[in-house]
Amino acid sequence: MEKLRELNLNSLRIAESAARNGSFIRAAEEQLLTPSAVSQRVKMLEAQLQFKLFDRRNNSVALTVDGEAFIRQVREGLDSILAARQAVADPNRERSLKVRALPTFLMRWLLRRLPDFQHRFPKLNLNLSTSYSIPEFTREDVDIAICYGDGQFEGLASKLLFNEDLTPVCHPSLPSQIGKTSKTLKVSDLKNFTLLHSATCTLNWHSWLKFAGHPGVINDSHGMQFDSCMLTFEAACAGLGFAAANRAYVAPDILSGRLIAPFDVLHPNRNGWHLVHPAGRPLSSNAETFAKWIADQAELSEAEVAALRRNS
């Protein structure tokens, strides 16, 4: 193969998808093709290149040594093409960064920290969006995202920001409704209050009560449903009941006295919030700047939560 025009760019994109997914079937789903079409395109590309890209297995494929080196260069080339297109379509793209986050994470944790980012990097334009789903980086114009889970996101590199740390919170006046104080309140007393539930965090109360040794409380108590964790926190601040909250989210409310966390039973979770981006693709300088900044902010947040634990 001597001429660039002999190389089909669609075939390169399909081969990259197969390499990233480790499967012709998954690549076919991503590229809206049949698995046989993906296989045929890859065979034609290998014939043009005159070396094998993949070792075929029963239900998966793996890059050969030559294939790994080639696909690495393909990704850099495709990223350059995408960057060039974006630069023409948006002249300010080089100074911008597109970040996707979960709604509650953005509203409860990230937003109050962004003035610091704005002060430190005034020339970088942030474009923020929210979603409960993991971005499809190959189809969506997203540079980096914050996702919730155990860190195992297929095809993505991830860095843990902080783990979830659940504990019930309520308005400071709530314990007095049953003649108790925050110091004398017991976990079993929760059956006398309304538990605030979120449609997006359905297991929070179940997992915390089980961890605390009182799983039956959830059946004995009244409940109120909301469509997001963020609303359960606001409802708790309004005195409607108890919310099972991640301490990093409600630390400012506890410090200000809007909420109290009356129990010393903290439920650490192996799940947490991770900074994610496509594996095998280098971050842009803007994304690297944001990644370092948010990692520093996560450390400060953990110190804030640790201080709350010591003072509780």
Image: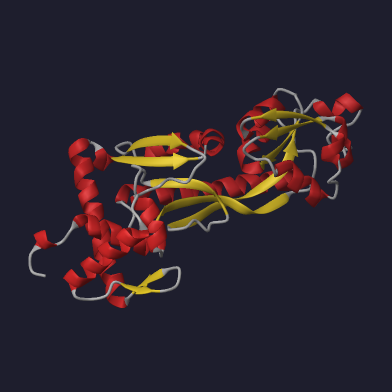
**155 vs 224: above or below:** below
**294 vs 61: above or below:** above
Image quadrant containing the N terminus: bottom left
Residue drawn at (65%, 42%), measured in percent from left and top? 246
Q: Where's residue 101, x and y in %? A: 48, 40
The one nearer the camera, 15 or 28, is 28
The one nearer the camera, 50 or 108, is 50
Q: Where's residue 184, x and y in %? A: 89, 37
Q: Is the image coloured rainbow, by chain, by secondary structure, or in one colour?
A: secondary structure
Residue drawn at (37%, 48%), measured in percent from left and top? 137
Q: Is residue 226 visible?
A: yes
Number of labels in the image equals 0
Q: Where's residue 269, x and y in %? A: 67, 53
Residue 126, picture quadrant: top left
**122 vs 275: above or below:** above
Residue found farthest to the right: 179
Image position of 32 (left or right of 45):
right
The one nearer the camera, 208 or 263, is 208
Image position of 167 (left or right of 273):
right
Q: Where's residue 105, x and y in %? A: 54, 39
Residue drawn at (11%, 62%), measured in percent from left and top? 6
Q: Is residue 91 visible?
A: no
